[in-house]
Amino acid sequence: MSAYVIATYNVIDKEIYKEYIKKTMPIVFKYGGQPIVADAKNECAEGEPRNQVVIIKFPSKEKAWGWINDPDYMEVKKMRHEATEKGFLTVADEFVMPA
């Protein structure tokens, strides 16, 4: 079953964030990840708004966690932490309607 990594945060340093994206994508692809949403112009319907929303689809939760825990990504993730604030990241299963 597919799984999704959903992240929201405020980008505070666009140059570092751009470099983070360049270095992250090969690692995402290594685990079969497919970017679905990367929206810096999203519209907040409830809660505290964030200026960046990202959704990445993975073939499974195991693959999503593989990316999150990949040693190469652990280093690159530091760039995201430096370039953003008020971050939220979660891993969720794809919705399947009960039979």
Image (spheres, rainbow, N blue to C red):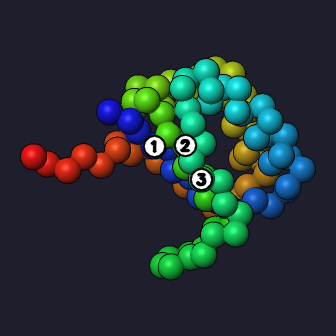
18 or 97: nearer the viewer: 97
Is 1 placed above or below 97 here?
A: above
Is 4 placed above or below 60 here?
A: below
- Rendering coords of residue 58 (x, y %): 48, 34
Q: Residues within 10 Å of mark 3 (few under 14, many from 20)?
A: some
Q: Mark on residue 56?
A: 2
Which mark is in front, 1 or 3? 3
The span from disc 2 to disc 1 (Cα, nearest Å) is 6 Å
Question: Residue tagged by mark 1?
Answer: 4
Identify residue type, mark 2.
Ile
Q: Are marks 2 and 1 in contact (CB under 8 Å)?
A: yes
Return the residue found at the far right: 15
Return the residue found at the far left: 99
Question: Residue tagged by mark 3?
Answer: 37
Residue at coordinates 41% horizontally, 39% vertically from top-left? 3
Residue at coordinates 65% horizontally, 54% vertically from top-left? 38
- Rendering coords of residue 73 (x, y %): 66, 28
- Rendering coords of residue 19 (x, y %): 84, 40
In this rendering, would 12 be left or right of 55? right
The span from disc 1 to disc 3 (Cα, nearest Å) is 11 Å
Q: Residues within 10 Å of mark 1 (few under 14, many from 20)?
A: many
Identify residue type, mark 1.
Tyr
Residue at disc 1, secondary structure: strand
Q: Residues within 10 Å of mark 2 (few under 14, many from 20)?
A: some
Sooner in the amino-acid sequence: mark 3 or mark 2: 3
Residue at disc 3, secondary structure: strand
Sooner in the amino-acid sequence: mark 2 or mark 1: 1
State whether residue 75 appears in this view: yes
